[in-house]
Image (cartoon, grey):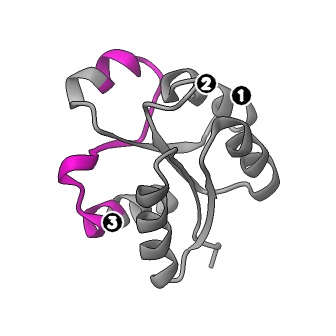
Amino acid sequence: MAKKRVLVVDDEPEFLRLVTDYFKSHHYEIVSANNLEDAVTAFHKHGPGVVLLDFNMPIVNGDKFLPILQEVDPFVKVIVITGYTLEDVEDKFKGLGYFAFFEKGTLSLEKLKQKVDEALAY
């Protein structure tokens, strides 16, 4: 069975820790980054099956970062997690091919895990 390797990219330390701890407790291999430079390095080094990507990041937002990931791996599965609404995300990520979207304010870690499993099996 393939490793359940997930890259979590978020600049909020508390949220990053929450998601990382949750997935580690469910036996996922988690790589985390709190900025996009570290995320690119981790993506190249670890080749995660799924990327959990915050939209609102310092310097470069997620909608500008997703195409960079897709250049490395055109089949990358990205799940956007943000405080923005679905309409905002659809507008910003239009045509970029993200796998799923979750709002931080209403995030269920169990539902996120189900979507990550779906993406890993895709």
CA–CA distance between discs 2 and 1?
6 Å
Q: Which residues are magenta?
A: 89-112
**Residue labelled with disc 2:** 67
| Callout 2 secondary element | helix
| Callout 1 secondary element | helix
Where residue 67 sits: x, y (%)?
61, 24
Q: Horizontal placement of 23 versus 74: left or right?
A: left
Residue lying farthest left? 106
Residue under the point 50% across and 67% down: 20
**Residue labelled with disc 3:** 114
Front-most of 34 and 71? Answer: 34
Where residue 60 sits: x, y (%)?
58, 23
| Type of amino acid under label 3 | Gln
**Residue labelled with disc 1:** 71
> Does residue 74 sit above or below 2 in this rendering?
above
Where residue 49 sits: x, y (%)?
60, 57
